[in-house]
Amino acid sequence: MELGADSERSTAAELSRRALDVAVASVLLVLTLPVLLLVLLGCAISLRANPIFVQERVGHRGRPFRFLKVRTLPLTAPAYTDKHHLDLKAVPAFCRLVRNLHLDEIPQLLLVLIGRMSLVGPRPEMRCLHDTMDPDFATRRTSVRPGCTGIWQVSEASRGLIRDAPEYDDFYLEHRTLRLDAWILYRTARKMLGARRPVDLSAVPSWALRQPDPGTEPAPAR
């Protein structure tokens, strides 16, 4: 296939992905608005603080952007640290419930609408952790917009740090299709509804993966 045709196909896919992002994020924002208002009110009362938490994260092409979440941690918690160093015992019960149900992530839909994030993609990382990654891996994973959810986010590996399981983001970038995005969104919904089985790369259905172009040899097994 000619390079020009590859470029046109890639551009068309990105335009389709962007249109899907805007459409789905708009619907989800409307549907979740009552829940978001209750969550904001509950967290504000529980923490006696502004319920919107803003943090700088590394985005598309390594550019920093303002990342939004519902505040679920006390003001005494450090703004930039990995989850293994957080004292979750000090988190009020209501805020722990919000964290466990991932309802604190709803404000990210606003970032999808303005183009800072996509519905599906590598999770945006804090600069202090981004800079500890292998430089080539860090560059690869920021070659696309960061996602509200992704294959790492719904996997067992999400209990650890992104840098410890690069195979998930690499797998997504290699096989990135709208079909794969749809499957990840489905698995994300299942996880939020209480599904206990995390995603393993071997569980990804073949129909969701990018198919090789006719006439090309299959990639060697790894």
Image (cartoon, helix red, strand yellow):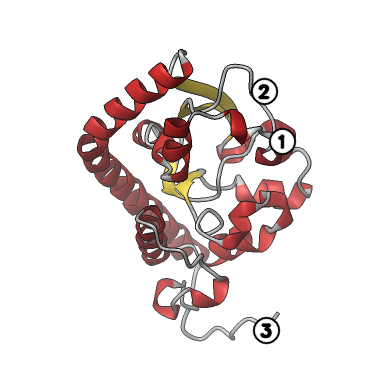
Q: Amino acid at mark 1?
A: His
Quarter of the view holding residue 107: top left
Q: Secondary structure at mark 3?
A: loop
**Foreground residue, 155 or 13?**
155
Q: Position of residue 62 (x, y in %)?
A: 63, 36
Are the residues tagged 3 and 1 within 8 Å (C-beta)? no
Distance CA(mark 2)–CA(mark 3) = 44 Å
Residue at the (62%, 39%) spot, across then down: 125
* Nearer-N-terminus badge (2/1): 2
From the image, tell me which residue sits under label 3: 221
How many residues crowd around disc 2 within 10 Å: few (fewer than 14), some, or many (20 or more)?
few
Q: Position of residue 66 (x, y in %)?
A: 52, 25
Disc number lying in front (2 or 3): 2
**Foreground residue, 55 or 72?**
72
Q: Amino acid at mark 2?
A: Pro
Above or below: residue 136 compared with residue 197: above
Above or below: residue 5 compared with residue 61: below
**Foreground residue, 115 or 120?**
120
**Foreground residue, 93 or 125?**
93
* Nearer-N-terminus badge (3/1): 1
Q: Position of residue 201 (x, y in %)?
A: 56, 71
Give the tally of numbered discs: 3
Relative to 11, is 55 on the left or the right?
Answer: right
How many residues crowd around disc 3 within 10 Å: few (fewer than 14), some, or many (20 or more)?
few
Which numbered disc covers residue 78? 2
Are the residues tagged 2 and 3 within 8 Å (C-beta)? no
How many residues crowd around disc 1 within 10 Å: few (fewer than 14), some, or many (20 or more)?
few
Which numbered disc covers residue 85? 1
Q: Amino acid at mark 3?
A: Ala
Disc number lying in front (3 or 1): 1
Quarter containing the C terminus? bottom right
Quarter of the view holding residue 206: bottom left
